[in-house]
Amino acid sequence: MVLAVDVGTSSVRAVAYDSDLTPVPGLESHLPHTPRTARDGTAELDIRPLTRRVIEAVDRVVEAARGAEIEAVGISSFWHGLAATDSSLRPLTPAFLWFDGRAAIDAARLRERLPERAIHQRTGCRLHPSYWPAKIAWLRRTQPALRAASVRWVSPIDLVLGALLGEVSTSASLASGTGLYGLRRPGWDRGLLAELGLDRAALPPVADEPRRGLLPRWRRRWPGLAQAVWAAPIGDGAAANLGSGCFDPRRRALTIGTSSALRVTTPAPPARLPPSLWCYRSSGARFVVGGALSAGGNLHEWMLKTLRVDDQRLPAPPERLTFLPLLAGERSPGFALRASGAVSGLTLATTPAELLAAGLESVAIQLACIDRDLDRVLPAPELVVASGTALLSNPGWMRMVCDALGRPLAPSQALEASSHGAALTALEAAGRAAAGRAASPGLGPRLRPSTDPAVRRHYAGAMARQTSLYRLLVDGPRS
């Protein structure tokens, strides 16, 4: 067996898979957690409880496995998380998550001082509060103690693994999601380090080699893991691509969970990235390029709670009703620093159900904008593979996404794409990469986009109206 541990912003999941990458019945644990959020943009998780939750998740699987040997462990983790520690790697701060927006001022100042276009091409990342440069600048500005030379900056999952394996390093996949790591030339970006006043010693070493050797305490606690090889952790988006069977540009992976993303696995980064896209290292010699929205299942849940409406039968949104789904801020496609949601075209006849439909359609339209920009740098795909509970459990939303993209869309049959991808990296670490690729999950029935010209005109018009509203409210002189 191999063990996959998926550390997300809302839960920790541990699942044992057999050599065909089929989940072993009864060998699974799922422990939810809730980030600490506030109106000022706060989005945090405490490191020690997160570590305990990972340990408990592994405990449950190992106990249920009754001493069976686990050959390898794969780790999927949320990208972009940041924590500060002292020189002994004791946490000085909580983990700051990608949607913590308190560094917006610092991102704006960095954009004023630095050549953002060049940095985007060097690192694959924009200057944005999601990434480390703005967050580190904010923390060093607001917490003077964090300016000390002894402070270390790390990904939360690397601290968790350090507690188990005894050494804190990071992977190229996680490093490339920080916004501080070279995309084409591996290594921490010297220009950004100089701007932030950081020495390379303040950042962890980067190593992708599989690791062995739990600390004695954990070998005694988990004898079935004593000889396991631990794959270098990868970002959850990269894991979701692998877990969906999207190994190359012929397939694009679309995920709607709490947020949304459209990603492509490639053997090399595009020669030039459009401003709307990012590019990170995946695992091994792979890269993943795409765009991520801050809206997804979170927007759907907010609308259901606020509008108190049933979403089982969605009406068609009225033609003039235009929704900007930026309630959690914006990443792709515009990476605005202070975006918020808006609705245009309301009348006294507008119903809650129509508002809900317009909100869901707006996410589909933004994903179509990302898809269009991917076409500028990559060949057109044969298929888009969908994953994420928020999307797969909502046929009406699936239909909207398919028609907005104008491409065939098939649901992945992997119950948890990121977990499945982590299990595949575990097989690769154990030297059985071919077996992992051969065991990629199947697909459900394909949806095909409507051929009705009226539907195509509807989505073209909806995209144009959303773009106009965005330019007026977010990208205009009043932004």
Image (spheres, rainbow, N blue to C red):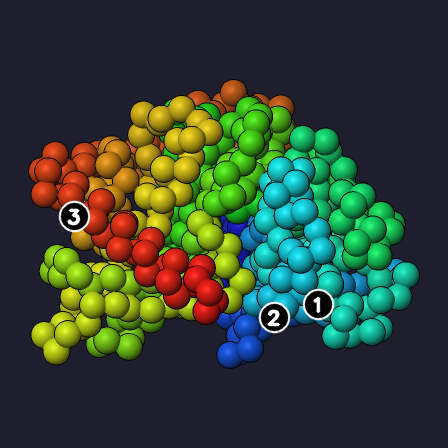
For residue 83, above or below residue 370: below
The alpha-carbon separation of the residues under discs 1 and 3 comes to: 43 Å
Q: Which mark is residue 102?
A: 2
- Assign the N terminus to one quadrant of the image: top right
Q: Nearer the viewer, mark 2 or mark 3?
A: 3
The alpha-carbon separation of the residues under discs 2 and 3 comes to: 37 Å
Q: Earlier in the sequence, mark 2 or mark 3?
A: 2
Q: Earlier in the sequence, mark 2 or mark 1?
A: 2
Q: Is residue 294 visible?
A: yes
Estimate how packed mark 2 is, as few (under 14), some (14 to 19) or many (20 or more) residues with alpha carbons within 10 Å. Answer: many
x 73%, y 68%: residue: 139
SS for tag 3? helix
x 45%, y 34%: residue: 264
- Decide: marks 2, 1 in contact (CB < 8 A)? yes
Estimate how packed mark 1 is, as few (under 14), some (14 to 19) or many (20 or more) residues with alpha carbons within 10 Å. Answer: some
SS for tag 2? loop
SS for tag 1? helix
Asked which quadrant contains residue 213, the reply is top right
- Decide: marks 2, 3 in contact (CB < 8 A)? no
Q: Earlier in the sequence, mark 1 or mark 3?
A: 1
Q: Which sits in the foreground, 53 or 245?
A: 245
Q: Is residue 210 visible?
A: no
Q: Which sits in the foreground, 435 or 308?
A: 308
What residue does disc 1 label?
138
Q: Residue 48, position in %: x, y?
A: 68, 67
Q: Is residue 15 left or right of residue 130?
A: left
For residue 335, above or below residue 381: below
Q: Which sits in the foreground, 172 or 58?
A: 172
Residue with the most extreme front position:
477
Q: Residue 16, position in %: x, y?
A: 50, 43
What residue does disc 3 label?
458
